[in-house]
Amino acid sequence: MKRLHPDLSLLFLFGFFTLFSNVCSDLVISKLDRQIDLSSQIVRFTTSLKLENNGAEAVSKVLLPYPENQGKNLAFLSVTVTEGKGKTKTSSDRLHVDVVHPEGMPPSLTWYAVSLPKELSKGGSLTLEVKAVFTHLLTLFPEKITQAEAQLVAFQDSAHYLSPYAVKIQSLTVKLPEPKVESYTKLENTKFSGSEIKYGPYENIPPFSLPTIIVHFVSNKPFSVAQELVREIEVSHWGNVQVTENYNLIHAGAELKGVFSRLDYQERPHVRGASALSSLVARLPARAHSIYYRDDIGNISTSNVYSDSAKTLLEIEPRYPMFGGWRTAFTIGYGLPLQDFLFKSQGKRFLDITFGCPMNDIVIENLFVKVVLPEGSKDISVVAPFPTKETRETKLSHLDIAGRPVIVLEKKNVVPEHNKKFQVYYRFSSFSLLREPLMLVFGFFLFFVACIVYVHADFTISKSSPSYIAKLQWDEVQTAVQQFQNIMNCVLVIHDKLDASLRDLSRTGDVQACKAARKNADAFLKELTKELKPLSAFLQSSPQALQIVPKVDELVIKEKELQEKLMLKHSMVVDSYEKKSGGRDIDNRVTAVQQKITLLRQEVDDLLEVIDEI
């Protein structure tokens, strides 16, 4: 296993700044208490500084330096003036902080200048509380672990506060997620109790004194990092604010070494997957409704919603437990009542809603907040509690003409401390609210008018034109041919029944029943023949039926011949049964006739198909 080594840059800074110990000698930190919270992947520094001005001139700014690795990973910085202690402690509003570049200082430090609410005069004192939030400060050590191993991380800093001012007395408390430590740097006045390591108090510390400390400890909390989060907040003046959040999430903790066993995880999830990401909890507004949770596959049912008068909690589980290096993408959405978030002020409407992610302990590398305003909104401005990159887009939705204005706010390295409210101001005419309903009414009106015109209008060119007359004649021919085919099909059905009566005769020997079937068939065939005559005459007289008439005449001739052969066969069979002839003699007598019947039936069927195609 690799060994942990102290950051040489801290040693370099110590050597460099001993040359500048009197640079900022006017201010002195009489007492400093520093707390470092390492209970999650987000490292939080809380520092209380009691400042005294020992110089001759008043001081209006206080410098706060951070080493290079902390400066580039600083996500949130807040400075307030505090008074009192314990329950009587009060804090002012956040003081203005600027990035500065003091002369003579190396670029490896990031400097911030805090503007005091009023100048600190000679002999005066005040207490500042500095809250700094960092990401990516913890080092995974080792970088890969098995499913059964705990996740170990290392943290490195200085036991003394990095400051250009002398410190009379200071102390440091390092809070760990659990009382399991592999190793930690032991200095003078070091105490390890429970899940806290305390350094100090140390007295009369010169500026830029930097003794390095390293803490190697167990941290099984998942390192949930959203590489990209797109929050779309769509405002509808019809009573709803729709929020859609698209997450691209990765577990940035120690990567899984070896194979994953679902069985081991199910049996002992707190041992065989202690650092796995198994669930997330989103804290939504109290009156959130129409909540959903899905991904590219579809809806994910492993979610629960708990609500009360103050909040709505959405607990979601990914489709699989996420170990280090594993990724997932999902979407959550919900609706909010408009009256809780949209207000009016000085002739303008403004949206007042939270900026960041509703889930705690998630680091967001790239956050895009898109506010979609109703079409027709103008004079748009944004008020945010921290710097953001602002761009404009246009979104086309249903019943839009020019599109809806979209304000895109982009911020990198976002932590839960950024989940504060911001405001979007805009002007919107009440008449614009009626635009979509009027468009719907007018659209339906035009539709019904078009239907009325279509139903009552005659779009034919002329009823006396040759093409129109030809079309009518062709429709009549088609109707006549269809009737002709139906009659022919009925004739063939009677032929089949007549043939079936002969089969019944061979089975039962009932000659009288067979003669009765013959008599009924003769009657039906005569009726159908009468119906065929006018149809044949019409087709022969119609110029549109020139192609069909030859086939129709041929079909009539073939059917008549088929009918004659069937009647002949029927008479021969009945006569043979009356003379008590044997079955073989009957078959010999009708064989030639049956062959002719089969051939004629095939020709009739083929002619019907040809006529149908024409």
Image (cartoon, rainbow, N blue to C red):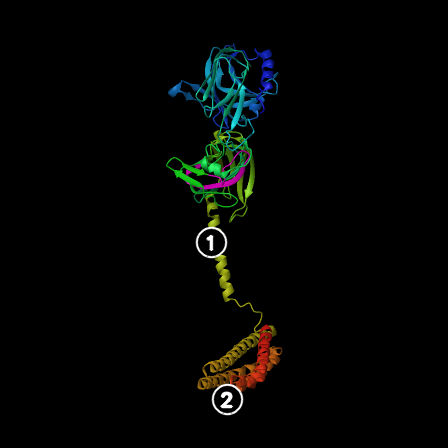
The residue beneath circle 2 is 575
Instruction: State which tag comes first along the sequence, 1 or 2.
Output: 1
Q: Which amino acid type corresponds to the residue marked 1 in the rendered image?
A: Val
Observer-nearest of 214 and 159? 214
- Classify mark 1: helix, strand or loop: helix
Mark 1 vs mark 2, CA separation in Å: 83 Å
Residue drawn at point x = 50 percent, y = 62 percent: 451
Q: Residue furthest left?
A: 309
Where does the C terminus fall, quadrant-wise?
Answer: bottom right
Name the residue nearer the viewer: 339 or 258: 258
Counting from the top left corner in percent of width and height, residue 137 is at 54, 25
Q: Quadrant of the N terminus?
A: top right
Q: Is residue 332 left or right of residue 595?
A: left
When the figure is inspected, residue 149 is found, relative to residue 186, above or below; the finding is below
Residue 441, numbered circle:
1
Q: Position of residue 511 (x, y in %)?
A: 46, 86
Q: Crowding at label 2, few (<14), some or many (≥20) Cα neighbours within 10 Å?
A: some
The magenta stretch is 317-345
Say if 493 sits above or below 422 in the image: below
Q: Is residue 133 magenta?
A: no
Queried whether the magenta region covers residue 337, the answer comes back as yes
Q: In this view of the protein, which residue sits in the foreground, 203 or 121?
A: 203
Estimate the x, y position of residue 405 in percent, counting from the top left.
53, 41
